[in-house]
Image (cartoon, rainbow, N blue to C red):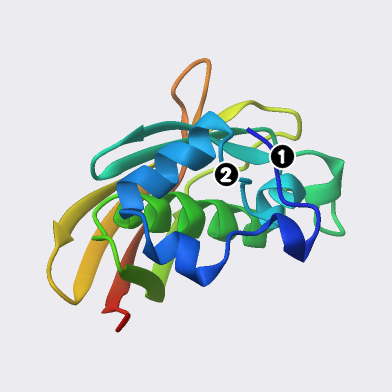
Amino acid sequence: MFFATSPDDLPSRDKVLSMSGMAFMEAVRDGRQAGPPIGRLMNCRVSEVDPGRVVFTGTPGFDHMNPVGGIHGGWYGTVLDSCMGCAVMTKVAQGSIYTTLEYKININRAIPAGTDILATGWVVHAGRSTAVAHGEIRNAKDDTLYASGSTTCLIMAIPG
């Protein structure tokens, strides 16, 4: 997997709309399509893609710390929003896109900097115009739960 480093690396809207969400997510996972630049900033990448389920791997570090040395809450929120939204994307039909309407997270415990994590998002409902997904961030080695969340997404068919 590689990350977009300029606007030219990002797919055109027409390219995204020409693929199902599942095909798009598989292309990102397989490195046929650049991952979003925020993935590089968050130090997370797509590692697994299944219908209704996406797993990110990553490692928060110094760049993700708040002023008192803990991993910033925004890191948890960004990673959970991403894995839950990408899980929804796997359910989006060709010619459609999604956007997050709202999300909520609960931080259960602090992630020590340098800890390898798995962030898993899974769809619990995918309808014609909305989808709901849940997500968790866990320690990749011992399965400790660090944070969980839920999202509601809007699915939009784009007239072509």
In the picture, measured across the screen, residue 50 lies left or right of residue 55, that is left
**Viewer-closest of 111 and 154:** 154
The amino acid beneath tag 1 is Pro
Q: Position of residue 19 (x, y in %)?
A: 36, 54
Q: Secondary structure at mark 1?
A: loop
The amino acid beneath tag 2 is Gln
Q: Quadrant of the C terminus?
A: bottom left
What label sits on residue 95 in the rendered view? none
Give the quadrant of residue 67.
bottom right
In the picture, measured across the screen, residue 58 lies left or right of residue 54, that is right
Q: Up-down: is 156 above or below 92?
A: below
Q: Up-down: is 144 above or below 71?
A: above
Residue under the image location 31 percent in, 56 percent down: 88
Q: Which residue is mark 2?
A: 33
Q: Position of residue 138 (x, y in %)?
A: 47, 33
| Mark 1 neighbour class, 10 Å CA radius: few under 14, some 14 to 19, many 20 or more | many
Q: Are marks 1 and 2 in contact (CB under 8 Å)?
A: no
Q: Position of residue 16 (x, y in %)?
A: 45, 61
What label sits on residue 60 in the rendered view? 1
Residue 77 seen in render? yes
Q: Earlier in the sequence, mark 1 or mark 2?
A: 2
| Mark 2 neighbour class, 10 Å CA radius: few under 14, some 14 to 19, many 20 or more | some
Q: CA distance from mark 1 to mark 2?
A: 24 Å
Residue 149 seen in render? no
Q: Residue furthest bottom?
A: 159
Residue under the image location 78 percent in, 50 percent down: 64
